[in-house]
């Protein structure tokens, strides 16, 4: 589909969107607080400022990203000029989740529009205030034909999926990802699926335990653990466990105080259904820290669990909440026995001062992305592709990759008429040996 919009119109519109987001930043933060008490600091760090930076980056680079790219030609076609043209797919459906409801809706929307597509966004029904402000901002900036927000739950989502799209971008759970993939297959619609998984965090005997604990507590308990790339469980070298657990306790208390339920920096679980699901994962006999819950207020304290088996409820699926199981290993074979039981995760974290061990882990396991000696921060570099592999997702985005995700790459070879080497044309008689030599040489 040819783009109905030119680059300067897209840039002007994205600039309007940037101004509206800045203008409504406080309202967005209030909506996020209303929906699940997301702390203001986290709202700025992971939602509004992220979107603002994505907008600035896109506006700045749009001309460059959209330009046809000339590539080195093949000598076989001499003389020619070869290009990659980027064309918009056409109509894009974006379905987004509730856990980072502003950022995960807006970022793909920005790139899809920037690439010249028409967009329909279905935000999450579980964060109604945030969806409302998204709708308000979008309808101020765009005409519905270019970008439209359709609010609603599962039925609305399924109705949209039954229509024909040129691309579907879905962020959410693995089970719904499969529903989306099936619906997309009906029309061979390309998809990006940004899903989840059980993200391991391996800590070896050389790790800086105190710093590891601090960075893990930050990554695990931000957004009350409801982050697709949060560490899901710990695998710590047996001899290190006791010290490491002490540091974890210390860091949790430093971050959220003696009673995290009154900390302004600790979010709530999205709803009572999810709170109930999480409470059922806590085996009180294994709790070594936290464990307090208040279902009426959707509160679960940062909780550490001593785990010895992967056959338990908490070790079955992605936890997606502030519960951190700690398992130990003595030999590498035990790490492998655990990690290889699960589907490929979205994220993987290694805490070690031993570069050989870290490199070995990176090369041995397949996962979306991750960090050595930190958690989650790989997300923040726009030059790193963000996405899963296997059950944790299909495709990746961020930075120029987001623009490319929503663009079909069309190959064009412009042949010169000045020269027409006769060699490739039939009759081929007597040319076989020569063509072999030429192809071999090329
Ligand atoms: P979800 O899959 O329940 O919902 C996501 C979206 O799909 C929502 O808009 C919802 O309305 C819609 N939906 C729900 N059920 C549907 C159905 N049966 N048919 C059609 N549409 C349906 O996910 P969630 O609970 O909102 O988010 C949590 C999950 O998302 C976690 O698994 C997390 O790991 C994952 N996630 C992944 C990323 C990523 O970037 N990879 C980011 C955030 C969250």
Image (cartoon, rainbow, N blue to C red):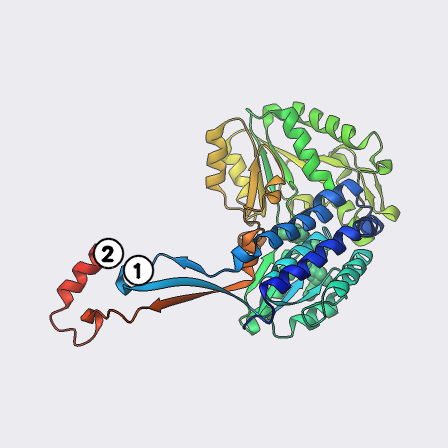
Is disc 2 placed on a helix, strand or loop?
A: loop
N-terminal-most mark, 2 or 1? 1
Residue 314 versus residue 203 in the image, above or below: below
Label 1 environment density (alpha carbons within 10 Å; few <14, some 14–19, many ≥20): few
Q: Position of residue 280 (x, y in %)?
A: 76, 47
Task: Give the SS element for disc 1.
Answer: loop
Query: Splitting the image into four quadrants, where does ligand 1 fall?
Result: bottom right
- Where is mark 2, residue-wise? 442
Left or right of 257? Residue 388 is: left
Of discs 2 and 1, which sits in the foreground?
Answer: 1
Residue 53 locus on image (x, y percent): 66, 48
Q: Please identify the quadrant where the N terminus is shown.
A: bottom right
| Image quarter (top left, top right, bottom left or bottom right) of the C terminus | bottom left
Q: Which residue is mark 1?
A: 74
Residue at the (69%, 70%) spot, across then down? 158
Disc 2 residue crowd, few under 14, some 14–19, many 20+, Cα 10 Å: few
């Amino acid at each position: 589909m040819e783009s109905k919009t030119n680059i300067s119109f897209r840039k002007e519109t994205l600039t309007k969107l940037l101004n509206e987001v800045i203008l409504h930043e406080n309202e967005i933060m209030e909506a996020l607080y209303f929906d699940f008490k997301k702390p203001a600091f986290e709202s700025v760090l992971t939602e509004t400022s992220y979107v603002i930076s994505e907008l600035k980056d896109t506006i700045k680079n749009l001309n460059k990203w959209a330009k046809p790219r000339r590539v080195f030609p093949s000598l076989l076609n001499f003389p020619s000029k070869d290009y990659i043209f980027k064309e918009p797919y056409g109509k894009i459906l974006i379905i987004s989740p509730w856990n980072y409801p502003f950022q995960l809706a807006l970022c793909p929307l920005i790139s899809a529009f920037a690439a010249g597509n028409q967009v329909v966004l279905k935000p999450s029904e579980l964060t109604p205030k945030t969806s409302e402000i998204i709708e308000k901002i979008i309808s101020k900036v765009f005409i519905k034909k270019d970008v439209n927000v359709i609010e609603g739950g599962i039925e609305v989502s399924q109705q949209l999926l039954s229509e024909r799209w040129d691309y579907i971008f879905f962020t959410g759970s693995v089970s719904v990802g499969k529903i989306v993939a099936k619906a997309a297959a009906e029309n061979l619609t390309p998809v990006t699926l940004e899903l989840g998984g059980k993200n391991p965090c391996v800590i070896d005997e050389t790790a800086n335990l105190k710093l590891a604990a601090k960075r893990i507590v930050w990554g695990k308990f931000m957004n009350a653990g409801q982050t697709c790339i949060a560490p899901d469980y710990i695998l710590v070298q047996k001899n290190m466990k006791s010290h490491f657990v002490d540091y974890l306790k210390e860091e949790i208390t430093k971050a959220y105080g003696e009673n995290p339920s009154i900390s302004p920096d600790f979010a709530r679980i999205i709803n009572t259904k999810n709170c109930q699901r999480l409470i059922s994962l806590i085996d009180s006999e294994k709790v070594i820290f936290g464990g307090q819950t208040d279902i009426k207020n959707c509160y679960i304290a940062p909780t550490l669990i001593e785990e010895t088996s992967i056959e338990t409820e908490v070790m079955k699926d992605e936890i997606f909440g502030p519960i951190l199981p700690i398992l130990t290993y003595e030999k590498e074979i035990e790490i492998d026995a655990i990690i290889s039981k699960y589907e490929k995760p979205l994220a993987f974290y290694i805490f070690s001062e031993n570069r050989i061990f870290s490199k070995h882990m990176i090369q041995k396991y397949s996962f979306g992305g991750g960090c050595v000696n930190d958690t989650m921060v790989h997300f923040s570099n726009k030059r790193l592709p963000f996405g899963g592999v296997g059950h944790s997702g299909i495709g990746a985005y961020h930075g120029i990759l987001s623009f490319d995700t929503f663009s079909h790459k069309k190959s064009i070879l412009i042949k010169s008429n000045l020269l027409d080497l006769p060699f490739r044309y039939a009759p081929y008689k007597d040319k076989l040996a020569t063509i072999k030599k030429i192809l071999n040489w090329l």
